[in-house]
Image (cartoon, helix red, strand yellow):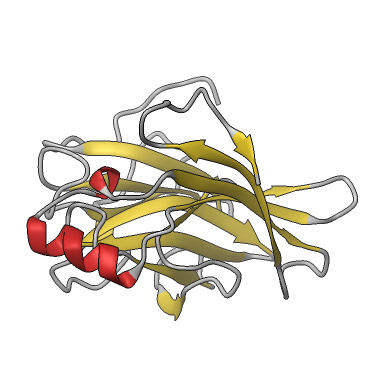
Amino acid sequence: MNRIRLVHRDHLSCEPILRRCPNGELICVGQVGDITEPAPGNRVVVFHSKDNGETWSEPFPIYPEDGRAVYATELMLLDGVLYAFLTLHNGHFVNWRCTTMQSRDNGYTWEDIGIHPALPNFSFARGMIRLSNGDIVIPYQYYPISPEENDRLAQSGLKIWEARISHVENGVLISKDNGRTYTRHEGPRTPIKGGGAAQMELA
């Protein structure tokens, strides 16, 4: 596609993820709500297009409202099933829980199937790719936040980037059996204090 269409306008409308559904429709998952990101009012909504992106449906939430901020980092299509990787948090990426929403009907209904079994909480799953040999690779970022550090951040009203940690772990999840099981492979560590993202060390 080489055309741009307005899908939604709000105080915050950002980070859209576009996929082609098995039924041929387009689906867009994006973040709305509040005026910044992250913020307590952030939510993730779904839009559908039956005419190749010319017009779009009204938004509807991908995750049931429970007062938590919601953030989406990947919308994966695998064997006709959609998987949305979500981060649930307090608006500061604290009290962070990862979960996965699954849809078997082209994104019209969603089921919470829990955290990806190969990832801990405080992780972002990124864009899945399938290699030429059939392996599935999902990049990820992981913030090594202990329960005690999470509590300190929450009680002080601090954001995740104010955590007392030295680095963010970057790596990949690899599946050699079409997504049935995954292994986690740690890669470069990105310092988040005193050095900036340009300095990296191998684990």
Q: Is residue 113 above or below residue 41?
A: below
Q: Quadrant of residue 98?
A: bottom left
Residue at 42% x, 44% y: name it: 166
Total numbered badges shown on the rendered structure = 0
Question: Where is residue 193 shown, x and y percent of the image?
Answer: 36, 34
Q: In this view of the protein, which residue sits in the foreground, 42 or 64?
A: 42
The answer to whether residue 69 is left or right of residue 49 is left
Quadrant where the N terminus is found in the figure: top right
Residue at 42% x, 53% y: name it: 143
Q: In this view of the protein, which residue sits in the foreground, 93 or 74?
A: 93
The answer to whether residue 86 is left or right of residue 39 is right
Question: Where is residue 201 shown, x and y percent of the image?
Answer: 61, 36
Q: Visible in this render: residue 22?
A: no
Question: Where is residue 125 shown, x and y percent of the image?
Answer: 51, 54
Residue at 17% x, 54% y: name it: 91
Q: In this view of the protein, which residue sits in the foreground, 136 or 110?
A: 136
Q: Is residue 108 above or below residue 153?
A: below
Residue at 12% x, 55% y: name it: 40
Q: Is residue 203 above or below residue 112?
A: above
Q: Visible in this render: residue 42?
A: yes
Q: Quadrant of residue 200?
A: top right
Question: Where is residue 117 shown, x and y percent of the image?
Answer: 58, 75
